Image: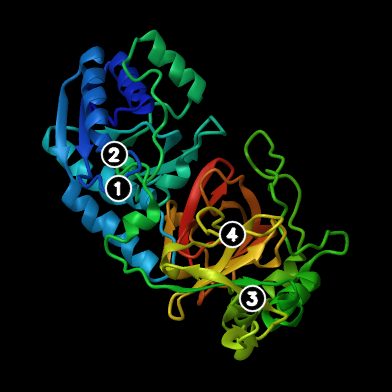
Amino acid sequence: MSKICVGLSGGVDSAVAALLLKEQGYDVFGMFMQNWHDADATLHGDCEWEEDRFVAEMTARKIGIPFYFIDLSREYRQKVVDYMFAEYAAGRTPNPDVLCNKEIKFDAFLKAAEKLGADAVATGHYCRRKETVLPDGRTLYSLLEGCDPNKDQSYFLCRLSQEQLSKAVFPIGELTKKEVRRLAAEADLPCADKKDSQGICFVGKVDLPTFLKQKLESREGQTIEVFDAYYSYNSLYRFCEEKIRELLKEDSLFTMTAPFTLQQNVLTSDGEPLGESPFREEAVAALTDEELERLSQPFDYSDIQFIEETYRSGRKHIRKTRFRENPFGKVIGTHEGAQFYTVGQRKGLGIGGHKEPVFVLGTDIEANRVYVGEGHAHKGLSRRCLRIDPSEIILMREDLRMRPGEVRRHRVRIRYRQALQGASLIMRESGLYILFDEPQRGITPGQFAVWYTGEEMIGSGVIS
């Protein structure tokens, strides 16, 4: 790699990445990509990219490297924004940052950099790449967690291929955020004190419903609160409860709800979780496909029905209608469209009159209903198992592909900045099932589950 293009974003991380490469003697140039034009949905009311480009160009001048600009807004809209709209319309919650890395930064942007003579693209991600030369002479590329546990960003790169990894450079993966800030300040870079960006990759911080309403139509529907009594009679919940009890070892603690703050597993120096699975290995391996499918299913609240009844009110006995009381739930309001809500969401619900916070438990796009529950310990917030369709499995290490019937232990996370969780991965013809050692809050269809061995990312998949 003699010539490297750094994707300068205007932030401190990519700036220090460029600085380090220049100091190491590489032939470096910076390139800023514009991926968004429309400022209508941004909370700031203007195009943040204009300021970012200005800072990026100043940074390149300070470091002493050439600077280029490229407009990839058409590709970004087609491959990232359209994907977002389609996923939300289907009732799933996408992760645009993951797609941006695969389809834009290490695809469209990489191709543009290669036309300018680059051999590789460097970014300011907090992760590391490892090269291993195989006996047959081929090079195997591995993606490792960043050394800063509070900033590890390997999750966002979970869909990269071996070809993409071969042309990726992550100069700050060995550093902490504090060290990056220090290096930027010592070099007097214009972005040294700039705050980290928030919101959707290259779009900025947006009001999500306003952003989605550009293509998704608003439609009033019912918001339904699900009561705890529902789960005592729900056949799926009772099945999961009984099956988890059956799978657990005698000395393992039984619980169906995740604590409010999931504690990270105690790790050894090489990143492997201590201890064994709380489940009996032979019992997990003996689970049928039908049992795994049921364990991985989200709750379907469509069986909570409400009957309207008429009554007379006031001195004039005016006829009014109301819903007959239901022990399993209550209609507590309306919303503008189920597609605008996601599992685990707390803010923006517009629901009052509760002692504890209210969370989204699920949505029904066809019936246009949003189901919510009160309290961090609500039974509908936690699940123990998820499923990934075989077509959605992407492996960093093809040589570690699981065979149907195989069970492996990995550390897994289902969202960025979640502590890695101990889990058993169970491969079947019908899909990959992930059975967690402890219940997980807010398992969300459309998000990515990513699994690791030690510090190395092995694979990922879209949660069904």
Spatial CA distance of label 2 from label 1 is 7 Å
Verify CB contact (< 8 Å) between mark 1 and mark 4: no
The amino acid on which the numbered mark 4 sits, given as a three-letter code, is: Gly
Relative to 51, residue 159 above or below: below
Above or below, 15 against 402 in this view is above
Mark 1 to mark 4 CA distance (whole Å): 33 Å
Using the numbered discs, state the Cα–Cα distance from disc 4 to disc 3 in whole angstroms.
Answer: 22 Å
Q: Which residue is mark 3?
A: 330
The nearer-to-camera label among 4 and 2 is 4
Residue at (30%, 47%) from the top-left corner? Answer: 163
Instruction: Locate residue 153 relative to residue 265 in the image: left or right.
Output: left
Q: Which mark is residue 167?
A: 2
Q: Which residue in the protein does label 1 denote? A: 163
Tell me the crowding category of disc 3: few under 14, some 14 to 19, or many 20 or more residues within 10 angstroms, Cα based. many
Nearer the observer, disc 1 or disc 3?
A: 3
Mark 4 or mark 2, which has the lower sequence index? Answer: 2
Choose between 282 and 214: the one closer to the eye. 214
| Comes first in the chain, label 1 or label 3 | 1
The CA span between labels 4 and 2 is 35 Å
